[in-house]
Amino acid sequence: MKYTLGLLISCFLLLWTGCGMGKSYEPQQVVVYTKEGCPRCAEAKEILQSRNRLYVEKNISDPKNRQEMWDLLHEQSGGEPVRLVMPVVVVDGELFFNLPQLQQFFSGI
């Protein structure tokens, strides 16, 4: 039993570091959907810039970007109505929105 637990822990640590989920995690693609005049959107961009992270900004004043964002949100929610607080962030294909603490969220990226 003692060796099994040690083996499990070793496998977990190997997977954790091998999959890039540790402190040195650098996503391949970050997309930030922003809105004109949104202070939280500006904060998100500022945080990413201060961490020297590359990202693609898609402002929803462009109808194409707005539709793309809503399509992603509706897909994730299964078509249920979505209450939204900007920004909407996509990290390596995973969608995040209504982020309470932007600084904390972006600390893992």
Image (tube, grey):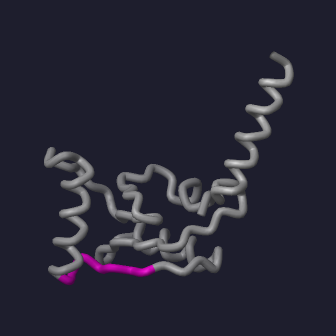
Q: For the point 42% across and 81% down, which residue is it? A: 56
Image point 20% across, 73% down: which residue?
Answer: 66
Q: Is residue 7 left or right of residue 84?
A: right
Residue 40 appears in which quarter of the rendering?
A: bottom left
Depicted 15 relative to depicted 88: above or below: above
Magenta residue check for 41 = no
- Residue 51's x, y, as percent? 65, 74
Note whether 82 is above or below 53 in the view shown.
Answer: above
Quadrant of the image for the C terminus?
A: bottom right
Split into 4 quadrants, where in the image is the N terminus?
Answer: top right
Question: Quick check: 37 above or below 80?
Answer: below
Above or below, comparing residue 64 to residue 109 in the picture: below
Residue at x 15% of width, y 80% of height = 63
Total numbered labels placed on residues in the image: 0
Residue 6 appears at what percent x and percent y? Answer: 83, 29
Place of residue 55 in the rendered image (x, y in percent of width and height, measured from the top left): 48, 78
Q: Who is closer to the viewer here, 75 or 37? A: 75
Res. 96 image quadrant: bottom left
**Residue 64 horizontal side relative to residue 14, left or right:** left
Q: Residue at x 74, y 32 (%)?
A: 8
In depth, the one of 100 and 12 nearer the eye is 12
How far across and how far down the image is residue 36, in percent? Answer: 29, 78
Q: Which residues are magenta?
A: 56-62
Left or right: where 36 falls relative to 78:
right
* Depth order, front residue of 37/85: 85
Q: Residue furthest top?
A: 1
Q: Residue furthest right?
A: 2
